């Protein structure tokens, strides 16, 4: 197993300390761990390209780690905060992630390459808003209330962008 794949897998395992730190009111440790996990998403691809370690397995492992990481964080946050807006965002984002994963699988099984189903600008924009929103919400217990509202707005915005990007993928891949 190479370094990029280890980084992808580490993103999943870093969920445990993120949640444990938060639940034990160590909010700064929780956000620091979240940032480290988020950076692994950039580093795995960067290192793979830089060291010529790009592989189909690595690309799929990265996508899986991303989906698991975001889905688990959203489900946990729904319970941790008991907020209906987080629940709505979680449903929208997770249902889109499942849908896009199956669409990618369908496209790949029908003889296209993984590169043909790579994320576009809106997919990357969705990820940026999503990760910033999820990260900010982890520090809201120790910040003014408007940080919570900003976090929610970013998470909800990422949910809507995610569905917009999904429909763009449908149009692009199924034509």
Image (tube, rainbow, N blue to C red):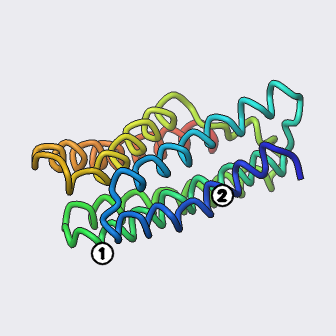
Q: For the point 21% across and 72% down, which residue is it?
A: 82
Answer whether residue 157 is visible to the viewer in this image.
yes
Q: For the point 47% across and 50% down, which residue is it?
A: 34
Q: Which residue is mark 2?
A: 64
Tell me if label 1 and label 2 are in contact, CB under 8 Å: no
Q: For the point 70% across and 51% down, which residue is it?
A: 8
The alpha-carbon separation of the residues under discs 1 and 2 comes to 23 Å
Answer whether residue 175 is visible to the viewer in this image.
no
Between 88 and 129, the residue placed more toward the observer is 129
Image position, residue 162 (x, y; %): 42, 45
Q: Tell me if mark 1 has few (under 14), some (14-19) or many (20+) residues whose alpha carbon lies within 10 angstroms of its own.
A: few
Q: Tell me if mark 2 has few (under 14), some (14-19) or many (20+) residues whose alpha carbon lies within 10 angstroms of its own.
A: some
Residue 69 quadrant = bottom right
Q: Which residue is mark 1?
A: 79
| 99 sits to left or right of 156 | right
First in residue order: circle 1 vs circle 2: 2
Image position, residue 51 (x, y; %): 87, 28
Residue 4: image tag: none
| 126 sits to left or right of 79 | right
Image position, residue 1 (x, y; %): 89, 53
Q: Residue furthest top?
A: 50
Between 149 and 126, the residue placed more toward the observer is 149
| 1 sits to left or right of 160 | right
| 154 sits to left or right of 59 | left
């Amino acid at each position: 197993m190479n370094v990029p794949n280890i980084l992808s897998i580490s993103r999943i395992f870093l969920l445990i300390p993120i949640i444990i730190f938060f639940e034990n009111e160590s909010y700064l440790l929780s956000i620091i761990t979240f940032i480290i996990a988020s950076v692994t998403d950039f580093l795995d691809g960067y290192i793979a390209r830089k060291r010529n370690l790009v592989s189909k397995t690595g690309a799929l492992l990265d996508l899986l780690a991303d989906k698991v990481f975001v889905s688990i964080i959203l489900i946990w946050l729904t319970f941790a905060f008991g907020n209906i807006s987080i629940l709505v965002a979680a449903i929208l984002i997770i249902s889109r992630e499942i849908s896009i994963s199956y669409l990618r699988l369908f496209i790949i099984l029908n003889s296209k390459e993984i590169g043909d189903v790579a994320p576009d600008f809106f997919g990357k924009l969705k990820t940026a808003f999503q990760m910033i929103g999820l990260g900010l919400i982890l520090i809201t217990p120790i910040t003014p209330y408007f940080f919570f509202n900003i976090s929610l707005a970013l998470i909800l915005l990422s949910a809507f962008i995610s569905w917009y990007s999904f429909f763009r993928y449908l149009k692009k891949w199924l034509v």
